[in-house]
Image (cartoon, grey):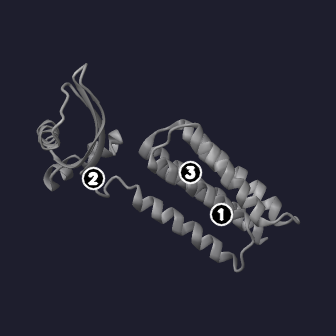
Amino acid sequence: MSQLLLFATDIVAVSLLVFGFYFPRHRRRDLVVAYLGVNVGVLAVAGSMSSSSVGAGLGLGLFGVLSIIRLRSTELDQHEVAYYFSALALGILGALKIEPVWHSIALMVLILVVMFIGDHPRLLPGYQHQLLVLDSAVTDRVALIAHLERVLGARVHSARVQKLDLVNDTTLVDVRFSHSTKSASLGTDTTARLGVR
């Protein structure tokens, strides 16, 4: 009975994670399938292993290998990696027999709470990250940061040059910046709708 309760809790938890948190915030349908598939697959395999003579260590090692293959097969943003491992962890917690049963349920709830808060659009809304191509080759770091702050109308915290093309006179730069508290609060709803990170 406790195993069925954990299975049901996992299904509810991953549904909330995917359809309650991830999809409304990021709108990537392809990853909805990936998260659900990973969770249910891990739940099924780990559930079978927990009732057989196969060691749990072997099962967890297999999941580690599969997750590395999955993560190397396509480019994922950091928040998408977090959702991926959350779905994986929920599946493992739903399959392993841990006594008392409320311990696993409490850990599932903890994962959901952390993901809800950590990926909430109102958490640090003014901080953003962009990959920009500038129409000039800027070799001076001070001049680069001043130019970026002028173009973005924001305070630049980090600017890392990815490519400096002196022939075509372009600069590819990875920039992390923040708007003032006033402009950040005004743009919170727009940021949430557009999914700007």
Q: In screen coordinates, is 13 left or right of 23?
A: right
Residue hosting label 2: 125
Label 1: which residue?
9
Which mark is in front, 2 or 3?
3
- Residue type for callout 2: Pro
**Label 1: which secondary element:** helix
Cα distance in 3D space between marks 2 and 3: 23 Å
Secondary structure of the residue carrying numbered label 2 = loop
Q: How crowded is mark 3: few (under 14 residues within 10 Å), some or many (20 or more)?
A: many
Mark 1 burial class by Cα count in 10 Å: few <14, some 14-19, many 20+: many
Q: Which numbered disc, 1 or 2, marks the residue that appears first in the sequence?
A: 1
Locate residue 100: give its quadrant. Answer: bottom right
Q: Residue furthest top?
A: 168
Across and down, in percent, residue 101 comes to: 69, 76
Looking at the image, residue 23 lies above or below residue 151:
below
Q: Are marks 3 and 1 in contact (CB under 8 Å)?
A: no
Residue 1's place in the image compared with 71, above or below, is: below
Query: Whole-Å distance between the Cαs marked 1 and 2?
Result: 32 Å
Q: Name the residue under label 3.
A: 84
Give the answer, above or below, for where 100 lies relative to 24.
below
Which of pointers 3 and 1 indicates the residue nearer the eye? 3
Q: In which quarter of the image is the N terminus?
A: bottom right
Mark 1 vs mark 2, foreground winner is 2
Circle nearer the N terminus (3, 1): 1
Amino acid at the residue labelled 3: Tyr
Categorize mark 2 by other alpha carbons within 10 Å: few (<14), some (14-19), many (20+): many
For marks 2 and 3 on the same chain, the one whose residue lies earlier in the sequence: 3
